[in-house]
Image (tube, rainbow, N blue to C red):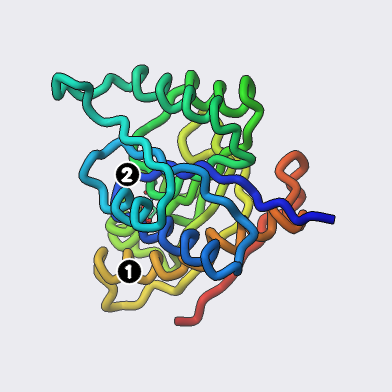
C-alpha cells in the first residue's frame, strides 16, 4: 500500500521557526508530510524566506497592488480560495498572528471540510491570546508550556490535542521563557502531526490530551 503524505497548508506571520522544523522533517523523511503551501499575511516575514528556500509555494496576502493593506475579510476570502484550490488534508497555524473570523474558520472546517490546528504558547485553557510569557511570569505561575489544539470560532478554545509543560525558573524573563517554550514547540508540533498521521489522534473523535513534561 502506498503511504501518501499528509498534505499541509501552513499559515505563518513571523520568523517561521516552527515551519522550518516541519520543512526539515519533510526533507529528512522524518515526517510523512507534503507542505503544499505557506500562506503569510506579512510580506516581510522570515517564514516566507524559509519557505522559498525550500521551494514551497508561497502566498503573500498583505497589501494590494496600490499598497493598501487587505481588510480582514479580503485576506480570509483570498486564503479560502487558495485552500479550495489546493485541498490540503490539514491546515496548520504555525505562528499565525491574525485573528480569524467565523467566515474563514467555518469556511475551512465546514465548507471545505479540512481540519485546522493551532500552536499556542501556553498550557491552554490558561493564557489564551497574546503576551503569554509575560503574563505567566506576572502571575507567578510555576508551570508554563505550549499546546496544539483544534481551531474553532472561539479564540484558542478548540479541543486541546497535545501539550508540553516546563517548570518556570526563578530567574526566567519573558525572553528566556519564550526561548524555552519555542524549543518545546519544535518537538510538540511535529509530534502532534505524526500522531494525526499514525491515527494515535483521531481528529473526529479526540479521546484524550497527550501531555509531555520537560525537565530542562
Ligand atoms: C510560536 O511561539 C507560537 O506558539 C506563537 O507564535 C510563535 C511563532 O514562532 N503563536 C501564537 O502566539 C498564536 N497566538 P515561529 O514563527 O518561530 O514559528
Of marks 2 and 1, which one's residue comes earlier in the chain? 2
Disc marking residue 179: 1
Q: Position of residue 50 (x, y in %)?
A: 34, 56
Q: In the picture shown, does residue 184 fall above or below 50? A: below
Q: Is residue 79 left or right of residue 42?
A: right
Quadrant location of the C terminus? bottom left
Give the residue at mark 2. 13
Taking the view exactly as shown, the residue that stands out farthest to the bottom is 216
Q: Position of residue 124 (x, y in %)?
A: 51, 51
Q: Position of residue 70 (x, y in %)?
A: 26, 22
Query: Residue placed at 48% from the left, 22% from the top?
Result: 81
Query: Residue placed at 44% from the left, 74% from the top?
Result: 167
Disc marking residue 38: none
Asked whether mark 1 and ligand 1 are closer than 8 Å, the reply comes as no
- Numbered disc 1: secondary structure: helix
Q: In the picture shown, does residue 93 fall above or below 153? A: below
Q: Position of residue 36 (x, y in %)?
A: 52, 44
Query: Residue placed at 32% from the left, 44% from the top?
Result: 13
- Numbered disc 2: secondary structure: loop
Asked whether mark 2 and ligand 1 are closer than 8 Å, the reply comes as yes
Amino acid at each position: 500500500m502506498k503511504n501518501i503524505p499528509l498534505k499541509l497548508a501552513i499559515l505563518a506571520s513571523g520568523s517561521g521557526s516552527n515551519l522550518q522544523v516541519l520543512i526539515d522533517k519533510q526533507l529528512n523523511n522524518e515526517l510523512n508530510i507534503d507542505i503544499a503551501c505557506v500562506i503569510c499575511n506579512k510580506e516581510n516575514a522570515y517564514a516566507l524566506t524559509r519557505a522559498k528556500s525550500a521551494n514551497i509555494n508561497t502566498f503573500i496576502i498583505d497589501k494590494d497592488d496600490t499598497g493598501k493593506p487587505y481588510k480582514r475579510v479580503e485576506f480570509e476570502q483570498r486564503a479560502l480560495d487558495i485552500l479550495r484550490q489546493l485541498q490540503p488534508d490539514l491546515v496548520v497555524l504555525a505562528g499565525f498572528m491574525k485573528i480569524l473570523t467565523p467566515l474563514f474558520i467555518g469556511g475551512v472546517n465546514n465548507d471545505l471540510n479540512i481540519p485546522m490546528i493551532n500552536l499556542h504558547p501556553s498550557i491552554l485553557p490558561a493564557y489564551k491570546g497574546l503576551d503569554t510569557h509575560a503574563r505567566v511570569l506576572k502571575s507567578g505561575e510555576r508551570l508554563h508550556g505550549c499546546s496544539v489544539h483544534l481551531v474553532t470560532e472561539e479564540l484558542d478554545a478548540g479541543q486541546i490535542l497535545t501539550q508540553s509543560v516546563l517548570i518556570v525558573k526563578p530567574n526566567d524573563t519573558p525572553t528566556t521563557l519564550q526561548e524555552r517554550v519555542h524549543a518545546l514547540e519544535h518537538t510538540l508540533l511535529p509530534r502532534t502531526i505524526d500522531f494525526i498521521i499514525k491515527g494515535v489522534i483521531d481528529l473526529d473523535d479526540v479521546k484524550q490530551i497527550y501531555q509531555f513534561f520537560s525537565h530542562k
